[in-house]
Image (cartoon, helix red, strand yellow):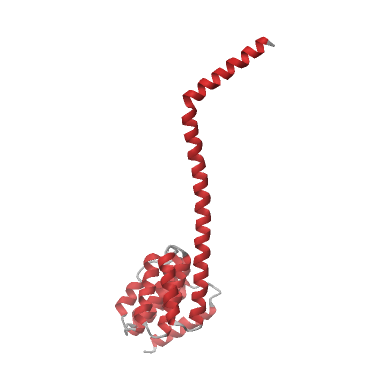
Amino acid sequence: MAAYDLEEQEQIAELKAFWNRHGNTILVAISAALLVVAGWRFWGWYQGSQSAQAAAVYTELQRAAQANDPKKVRELTGALLESHPRSLYAALGALISAKAHFDSGDLKTARVQLQWVIDKARDPEVQALARLRLSAVLLDEKAYDEALKALAVKPPASFEALFEDARGDVLAAQGKRAEARAAYQAALGKLGAGDNAARELIQLKLDAVGSI
């Protein structure tokens, strides 16, 4: 028993010596690990909280747009872009705001909102949608070169037919029949097998350009 006690005492002494040499390093490492875990947990909570707040503002914005309240649309869009600029809700809110202003005849504000989405949105498809809508606004203003510039990028595959169709609309408005026909034909070639309604509409445009 005495031999066992002696061995135990030696182990305790070795443990104390080890702790004296490395204790501070171990504590620092443990503290750092705990800080990392706490940081990730806080970031997850913060992100969730921010997303919930952005969603609430976005819901109000949708209601304001449906109620044709341009003042409130402007205020809520400003709140989204200022407080949650990196969220998807901000980009979608700017799209809603652009449509509301376009419908009310405020094309300048609509252009500003759409350009914000193009510059700031993180989702390529949301950016592509903003480019399509911007080209429509510019077409309405007869700013044909700017409209074509807005479409002069390679969009996501699901938007290729839409971009070619929009390009055809601008070229047709410019009286460039051959180029418009080429754009409409390209759009037809990029449509999926089930896009019958879109195919019929583009074919009508193609026929109209050919009869000019």
Q: Give left or right: position of 182 versus 5.
A: left
Can you give x and y, in whole percent of width and height, for residue 95 in the image? 44, 74
In which quadrant of the rendered image does the N terminus lie?
Answer: top right
Can you give x and y, in whole percent of width and height, for residue 11 in the image? 58, 18
Occupied quadrant, residue 139: bottom left
Q: What residue is shown at x 49% (from left), y 33% (from top)? A: 27
Can you give x and y, in whole percent of width and height, for residue 116 in the image? 37, 70
Residue most extreme to the bottom:
212
Can you give x and y, in whole percent of width and height, for residue 140 in the image? 36, 84
Depth check, front residue: 1 or 78: 1
Q: What residue is shown at x 53% (from left), y 59% (from top)? A: 48
Q: What residue is shown at x 45% (from left), y 74% (from top)? A: 76
Vertical order, 128 against 7 (above or below):
below
Vertical order, 138 against 124 (above or below):
below
Vertical order, 59 against 42 (above or below):
below
Residue most extreme to the right:
1
